[in-house]
Image: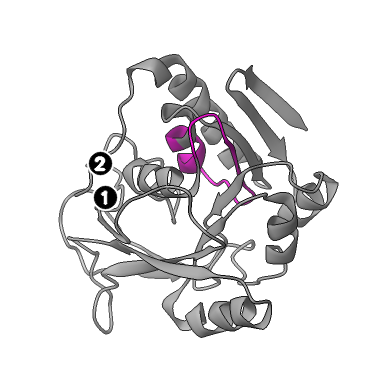
């Protein structure tokens, strides 16, 4: 299923598997890829949402949560420019080896979390790396500070276990593209990449396998399209 939400800027959502949709796209179909693929690390759910730092949690792992770089060669084919993706800290060497073996220029970016959630064991994860392959056309810092969206506290929170803040995605959109470009997110989730892209005058192509999150992303993108002329570029925090 394909949802065409807008022609200017072009906004299209695919319901399907990332690898299958990527394979169907033409070489150089988009200017850039920006995505948050599954880490394969699971997540911790707490009994209550809100502002507190409640350490109580139950570990869970969704069926789709499996780490792989199998999508990356196709993403590099589909993108005329850079490919940016979040990754777990313990997979960084694997991703850097992928880039070095292929002679791809890369840049390491950092999303810093001022108030990371505590973990039942060990130090809290206060940052997430983002690896950019190929040169970045935008200018800006390689560090951005922002808190994770939390249900009961933040209006943008959707309940997705790995939702990224729109401000973080907007920072990356500006680094990865220029106004009028189209970005692809093959692991769209709740649609934060698309919301940021539309708000900054870019087109967006999103792919999501879970119907429930596709519906959330569609709702958010339709709202973003209505508000796009009123949105401003993000401020670094």
| Quadrant of the snapshot with the N terminus | top right
Residue 100's tag is none
Give the residue at mark 2: 152
The residue that appears at 18% across and 60% down in the rendered structure is: 114
Q: Is-magenta flag for residue 222?
A: no
Residue 60 in sight from this viewpoint: no
Give the residue at mark 1: 49
Q: Nearer the viewer, residue 206 or 230?
A: 230
Mark 1, secondary structure of its residue? loop
**Residue 83 lies in what quarter of the image?**
bottom right
Residue 188 on image: x %, y %: 57, 46
Residue 98 in sight from this viewpoint: yes
Q: Is residue 231 left or right of residue 7?
A: left
Q: Is residue 222 left or right of residue 227?
A: right
Query: What is the magenta range?
Result: 178-196
CB within 8 Å, label 1 to label 2: yes
Residue 137 on image: x %, y %: 48, 49
Q: Is-magenta flag for residue 188?
A: yes
Q: Is residue 100 left or right of residue 44?
A: right
Residue 223 on image: x %, y %: 45, 21
**Residue 224 lies in what quarter of the image?**
top left
Name above or below for residue 12 compared with residue 225.
below
The residue that appears at 45% across and 49% down in the rendered structure is: 160
Q: Is residue 233 left or right of residue 18?
A: left
Residue 139 on image: x %, y %: 36, 49
Q: CA distance from mark 1 to mark 2?
A: 6 Å
């Amino acid at each position: 299923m394909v949802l065409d939400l807008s022609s200017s800027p072009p906004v299209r959502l695919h319901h399907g598997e990332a690898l299958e949709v990527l394979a169907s796209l033409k070489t150089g179909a988009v200017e850039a890829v920006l995505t948050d693929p599954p880490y394969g690390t699971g997540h911790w759910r707490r009994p209550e949402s809100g502002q507190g730092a409640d350490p109580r949690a139950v570990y869970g792992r969704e069926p789709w949560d499996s780490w792989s770089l199998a999508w990356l060669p196709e993403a590099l084919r589909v993108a005329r420019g850079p490919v940016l993706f979040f990754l777990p800290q313990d997979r960084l060497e694997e991703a850097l080896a992928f880039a070095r073996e292929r002679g791809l220029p890369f840049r390491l970016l950092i999303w810093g979390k001022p108030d990371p959630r505590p973990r039942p064991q060990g130090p809290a994860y206060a940052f997430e790396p983002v690896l950019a392959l190929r040169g970045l056309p935008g200018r800006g810092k390689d560090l951005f500070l922002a808190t994770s969206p939390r249900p009961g506290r933040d209006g943008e929170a959707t309940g997705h276990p790995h939702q990224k803040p729109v401000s973080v995605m907007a920072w990356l959109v500006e680094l990865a593209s220029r106004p009028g470009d189209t970005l692809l997110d093959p692991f769209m989730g709740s649609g934060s990449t698309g919301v940021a892209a539309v708000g900054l005058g870019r087109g967006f192509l999103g792919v999501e396998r879970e119907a429930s999150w596709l519906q959330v992303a569609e709702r958010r993108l339709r709202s973003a399209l209505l508000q796009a002329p009123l949105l401003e570029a993000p401020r670094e925090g």
